[in-house]
């Protein structure tokens, strides 16, 4: 007889012994179905793959299992005698909720879709075939992941299943009492290989089947194992699953007895689509004839698992997610180079971020000084990096010539830096004398370098004539330098007597009938004088940087007015002629002097006025005023003591001192 029954199926593999053992009287039923589907989202039919990924995910589905002869009666030869349940079809509706990447809450509601059997009497007790639809015990589950992540080689979780007594014992879909099943689960994978295992304790208050004999109920130790291979990037799974339990609360003799240890094996296959939909099927059989072990079992499931989207973390909160962030713990910027994406900006790629790089646009090196950190090396700190510095260890200046860039200035390019070069704009040579170091060679030390010195071994004077530049003067060109020439203006001959050396071999060179040795002006004709310093000299002549006048210019007493006299006129005209004949004399200072008679302030003014009067006379006579200056010294520069009239007369004078002479070319 075939009837549809409730969801919680009675799965009883009853082996009836013909050896005379009587079954206990009574006809009350109990939960017989031994197939307990895995929580939704597992890759297995009955074991747990421990996929706890996601902050919140939902998995759900329907599992249909068919059992053949879940409750049969056999003789000692395992021949079928009778069957209370020949066929049973369950549908399991369930869902799982994963949250916080660690916890899972689930439920499973079994519903009997179809079953077939007949009434049987056992040892005087009548057991009726289920004849109405029913649901099984609602299973509620809470699990927590302890160790590992999904996909690791080892993951462990702890959980508990609670079976709410929503089933009907008369329909063999429930015990009518609360059941609890704490368990420990492990799972993992390595390459294509995957596995899962569990062990638990199934608390069951009902301990009497009412059938007597060796068929006992009670709390059980449960266990399970699954092994498999995954292919097609985890989409396809094939592998066997083993489930079993044994009663441990009937005194111990029944533990692992074949009548109290229902076990079965399933071979399953599963395929997961990218959409999250999964299809699975399996088939197997019971190993022993214990209560609930079917002769055969088939399972089919369809489910949906919300796809897992890995969380997008951005630990440094720079807007670049960690999987794409090469520097996930340091805020950075977007970069086309994956190795730099999300790292702090480093424009010059020198490994020093721009925020700390004093030279962010030029590759450099690390430095303790923040002002130099990230800048190219500059050992001499001259602002020119070593790579471009021709003198990296000596502070220098920028230069267009790479060979001089960064070197100290050397304007004359003589290899001696300006700071050490006594002649920085003239190429020279090294010299131990710092005042000459870097200057051109000047062996005679006359200030005219050897390259331009016509007499490099003799101290000389500058000359516009290259053949005489640096040589001592020899104005008369007699080959005897003026400094040793007793007659520098008249060509002469060498003589051991310094007074005659360079003089003509003539006792009266100027022909004024005054012997040279007594002639104060031996090369200028003059008149005899009792004064040895003027003997043989003309009334006016040039000597020792001065235009010497033999006779003083006379002035009206107490005034600056030049007295009218032939002597004054002759003297002033002679001064004028000397200036005209010697254009090399560029400046003559006309000086006025007085004796000490009178007040000094009056004498000072009088001397200045007299000097100006003489200068004005010469200018009026035709001498360029730029060649004359005038100054009065009053009584400050006497030539003789003012104690006598002769001395005072000598002090009342006008002098013509040569202040500037044009350089002579000789």
Image (spheres, rainbow, N blue to C red):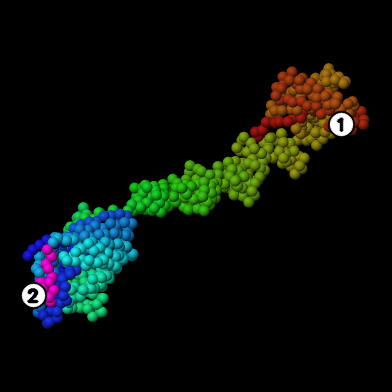
Q: Secondary structure at mark 1?
A: loop
Q: Position of residue 407 (x, y in %)?
A: 53, 47
Furthest residue to the left?
1
Closer to us: 35 or 128: 128
**Does the magenta segment cover residue 129?**
yes
Quarter-of-image position of residue 249:
bottom left
Q: Residue at (67%, 36%) from the top-left corner?
A: 477
Residue 434 lies, in percent from the top left, at 64, 48
Question: Whole-percent x and y of residue 167?
Answer: 20, 63
Viewer-closest of 271 and 48: 48
Q: Residue at x 81, y 22 (%)?
A: 609
**In the image: residue 658, left or right of residue 269:** right
Would residue 539 be found to the left or right of residue 225 on screen?
A: right
* Position above or below: 25 against 303: below
User: Range of the magenta residues?
Assistant: 120-131
Q: Position of residue 22 (x, y in %)?
A: 14, 79
**Residue 462, relative to residue 257: is it above or below?**
above
Question: Total of numbered circles in the picture?
Answer: 2
Which corner quadrant holds the N terminus?
bottom left
Question: Which residue is tagged 1?
Answer: 530
- Please tell me which residue is depicted at 12% across the width and 75% down the height of the picture: 124
Q: Quadrant of residue 512?
A: top right
Residue density around tag 1, few if under 14, some if 14–19, many if 20 or more, within 10 Å = few
| Mark 2 vs mark 1: in front | 2
Image position of 570 with respect to 39: above or below: above
Residue 425 vs residue 554, the one in the foreground: 425
Q: What is the quadrant of residue 562 in the picture? A: top right
In this view of the protein, which residue sits in the foreground, 542 or 594? 594
Is any atom of residue 568 visible in this view?
A: yes
Q: Which residue is mark 2?
A: 81
Quadrant showing the C terminus: top right
């Amino acid at each position: 007889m075939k009837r549809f029954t409730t969801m919680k199926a009675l799965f009883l593999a009853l082996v009836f012994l013909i050896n005379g053992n009587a079954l206990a009287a009574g006809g009350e039923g109990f939960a017989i179905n031994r197939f307990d589907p895995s929580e939704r989202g597992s890759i297995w039919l009955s074991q747990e793959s421990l996929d706890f990924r996601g902050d919140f995910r939902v998995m759900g589905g329907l599992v249909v299992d068919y059992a053949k002869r879940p409750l049969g009666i056999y003789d000692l030869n395992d021949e079928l005698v009778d069957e209370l349940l020949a066929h049973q079809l369950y549908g399991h509706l369930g869902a799982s909720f994963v949250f916080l990447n660690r916890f899972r809450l689930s439920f499973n509601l079994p519903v009997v879709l179809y079953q077939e059997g007949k009434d049987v009497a056992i040892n005087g007790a009548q057991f009726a075939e289920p004849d109405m639809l029913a649901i099984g015990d609602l299973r509620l589950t809470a699990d927590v992941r302890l160790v590992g992540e999904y996909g690791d080689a080892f993951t462990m979780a702890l959980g508990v299943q609670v079976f709410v007594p929503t089933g009907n014992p008369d329909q063999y879909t429930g015990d009518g009492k609360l059941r609890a099943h704490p368990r420990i689960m492990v799972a993992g994978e390595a390459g294509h290989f995957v596995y899962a295992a569990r062990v638990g304790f199934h608390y069951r208050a009902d301990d009497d089947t009412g059938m007597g004999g060796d068929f006992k109920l009670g709390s059980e130790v449960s266990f399970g194992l699954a092994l498999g291979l995954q292919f097609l990037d985890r989409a396809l799974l094939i592998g066997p699953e083993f489930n079993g339990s044994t009663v441990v609360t009937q005194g111990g003799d029944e533990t692992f007895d074949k009548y109290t240890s229902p076990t079965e094996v399933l071979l399953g296959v599963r395929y997961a689509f990218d959409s999250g939909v999964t299809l699975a099927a399996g088939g197997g059989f019971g190993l022993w004839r214990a209560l609930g072990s079917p002769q055969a079992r088939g399972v089919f499931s369809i489910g949906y698992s919300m796809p897992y989207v890995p969380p997008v973390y951005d630990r440094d909160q720079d807007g670049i997610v960690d999987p794409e962030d090469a520097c996930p713990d340091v805020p950075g910027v977007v970069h086309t180079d994956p190795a730099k994406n999300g790292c702090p900006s480093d424009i010059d790629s020198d490994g020093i971020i721009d925020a700390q790089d004093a030279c962010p646009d030029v590759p450099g090196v690390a430095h303790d000084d923040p002002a130099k950190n990230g800048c190219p090396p500059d050992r001499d700190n001259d602002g020119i990096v070593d790579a471009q510095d021709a003198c990296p260890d000596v502070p220098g200046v920028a230069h267009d010539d790479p060979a001089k860039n960064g070197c100290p200035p050397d304007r004359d390019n003589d290899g001696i830096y300006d700071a050490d070069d006594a002649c920085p704009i003239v190429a020279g040579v090294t010299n131990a004398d710092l005042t000459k170091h870097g200057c051109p060679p000047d062996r005679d030390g006359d200030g005219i370098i050897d390259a331009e010195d016509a007499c490099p071994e003799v101290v000389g004077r500058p000359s516009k004539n290259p053949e005489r530049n640096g040589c001592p003067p020899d104005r008369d060109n007699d080959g005897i330098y003026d400094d040793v020439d007793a007659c520098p203006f008249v060509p002469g001959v060498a003589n051991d007597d310094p007074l005659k050396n360079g003089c003509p071999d003539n006792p009266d060179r100027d022909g004024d009938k005054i012997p040279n040795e007594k002639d104060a002006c031996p090369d200028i004709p003059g008149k005899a004088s009792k004064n040895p310093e003027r003997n043989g000299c003309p009334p006016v002549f040039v000597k020792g940087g001065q235009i010497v006048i033999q006779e003083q210019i006379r002035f009206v007493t107490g005034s600056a007015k030049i007295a009218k006299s032939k002597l004054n006129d002759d003297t002033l005209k002679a001064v004028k002629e000397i200036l005209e004949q010697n254009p090399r004399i560029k400046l003559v200072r006309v000086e006025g002097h007085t004796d000490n008679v009178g007040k000094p302030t009056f004498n000072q003014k009088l001397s200045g006025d007299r000097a100006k009067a003489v200068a004005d006379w010469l200018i009026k006579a035709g001498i360029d005023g730029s060649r004359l200056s005038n100054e009065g010294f009053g009584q400050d520069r006497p030539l003789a003591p003012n104690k006598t009239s002769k001395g005072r007369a000598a002090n009342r004078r006008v002098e013509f001192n040569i202040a500037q002479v044009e350089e002579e070319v000789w």
